[in-house]
Image: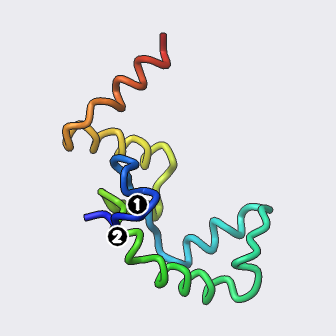
Amino acid sequence: GRLPDSPAANAGDSTRPDAPTELLVARLQAHDEERPLLAAGMVERLEALRTARETLYAEVADMHMNTAERSVEEIAQEIRAMQPAHGHDRYAQKSSATER
C-alpha cells in the first residue's frame, strides 16, 4: 500500500527505476549538472540517500525496474509493455490523443 499522506498516494501507477550505485554515480558524473547533495563523497552520500528513501520508494511505486545497462528507449518500451498487463489503457488513450 501507499503512504496515506504521501504526495504520490493518489498519483496513479508509478514505476521505480533503479540501478547499482556505481552506475548511478557514472551517469551523474557524465553530466555537468550541479548536484549539491552529492558534492562531497558522492558514492557514500548517494548510498545514504538511497537507504533513507528506500522505504518510501517501495511504498509509492507500483513497479520496480532495474535500469542497469539499458537504454532510455528500452526502459520506456518495457514500461509501456507493462501497462496493459495491469489493465491500464489510459496510456494508449493519451498517446493517440496527442497524435491528433
Disc 2: which residue: 58
| Side of 8 relative to 4 (left or right) | right
Residue 39, position in %: x, y?
76, 80
Mark 2 and mark 1 residues within 8 Å of each other at the beta carbon: yes
Q: Relative to the observer, which residue lies in front, 49 or 6?
A: 6
Image position of 12 with respect to 98: above or below: below
| Side of 24 relative to 82 (left or right) | right
Rendered image quadrant of residue 44: bottom right
Residue 13, position in %: x, y?
33, 48
CA neighbours of label 1 inside 10 A, class few (<14), some (14 to 19), many (20+): some
Image position of 41 with respect to 33: above or below: below
Residue 29, position in %: x, y?
71, 69
Question: In percent of the image, x 36 and y 62: which residue is there?
Answer: 60
Question: In percent of the image, x 35 and y 39: which residue is there?
Answer: 80
Disc 1: which residue: 16
The amino acid type, in three-letter code, at marker 1 is Arg
The amino acid type, in three-letter code, at marker 2 is Ala
Residue found farthest to the top: 100
